[in-house]
Amino acid sequence: MTSEPVILSRTQAGVRTLTLNRPDKLNAANDALLLTLTGELEAAGRDPEVRVVVITGAGRGFCAGQDLGDVSGRDMTFTEHLNHTYNPLIRTIRGLDKPVITAVNGVAAGAGASLALSGDIRLWAGSASLIEVFSNIALVPDSGSTWFLPRLVGYHRAFELMALAEKVGPQDALRLGLCEHVYPDESFREEVQQYAERLAARPLHALGLTKRALNAALNSTLDQALDLEAELQQLAGDHWEHEEGVTAFGARRAPDFRREG
């Protein structure tokens, strides 16, 4: 009997949707899920048909964090485990030169919260929630949470959320800047697809450069950001997308950024 794949992959209108597929465990992560997701993201980055990647969960949960049963009794340190699984995944998401949407359809806990925060765009369902659950088992937030969360909500609020393991619902997530939009559960997947297709119609090369600039600016001085902007602007200006955008503007028509050259 063939077991269900831990990651489901579907491509529609330039949007590659990667679905965490352990719904009976609220998509708690094991090694197979994490390594497969990283591989699927890398493949999406290489595929010229893919313009936007969506990460979401099957069933009622987005990702309930680490499947503790999967690591119980394993002869591997915490550091080794993170460097083997979660850290390469988060680096792949942030380094991908295509937009990544995290579509949070249910609970995002622990490392699942880190995954939810890692997207370039975060879309939530009405039943979604986020909880930095690490302190409940006397661990430190990992998989990028200590980097993402304080940049979104500030040090003090981030510390409180981590120290008290407080659950954040959709409206508070919107207020705090943890997501960009919240959609009703019953139309969530359709809304995510429509949003992703809108994004897929935008200039892919320019958005990849924009993502690179923003990532760098988070850890750079103003002078460094200005220098990188100038460098990347030249790369954008030399690309056919720029010519198409200018031509379309002059012709008073919508630009076609999906054509090649």
Image: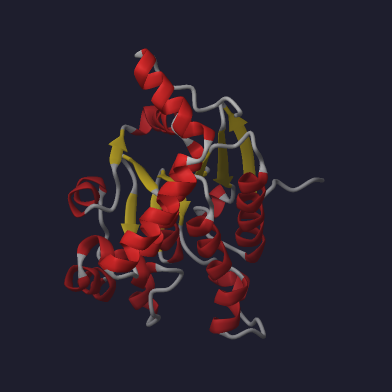
Residue at figure coordinates x 34%, y 43% from the top left: 124
Q: Residue 29: x percent and y percent?
A: 56, 61
- Total marks shown come to 0
The residue furthest right is 1
Task: Please say which color scheme the image uses.
Answer: secondary structure
Residue 88: x and y, percent? 57, 67
Front position in the image: 32 or 61: 32
Task: Answer above or below: position of 151 versus 199.
Answer: below
Q: Is residue 99 visible?
A: no
- Tell me: residue 127, above or below residue 212: above
Q: Position of residue 44 (x, y in %)?
A: 62, 45
The C terminus sits in image quarter: top right
What residue is rendered at 33% in x and 43% in y?
Answer: 127
Query: Residue 56 placed where, x, y %?
Result: 49, 45
Q: Is residue 192 left or right of residue 9?
A: left
Residue 24 visible (yes or no)? yes
Q: Is residue 27 left or right of residue 157?
A: right
The image quarter containing residue 154 is: bottom left
Give the camera-side residue of 43 and 161: 43
Q: Nearer the viewer, residue 96 or 254?
A: 254
Q: Is residue 57 above or below residue 141?
A: above
* Above or below 148: residue 193: above
Instruction: Identify the residue at horizontal 28%, vertical 53% (top origin).
Output: 178
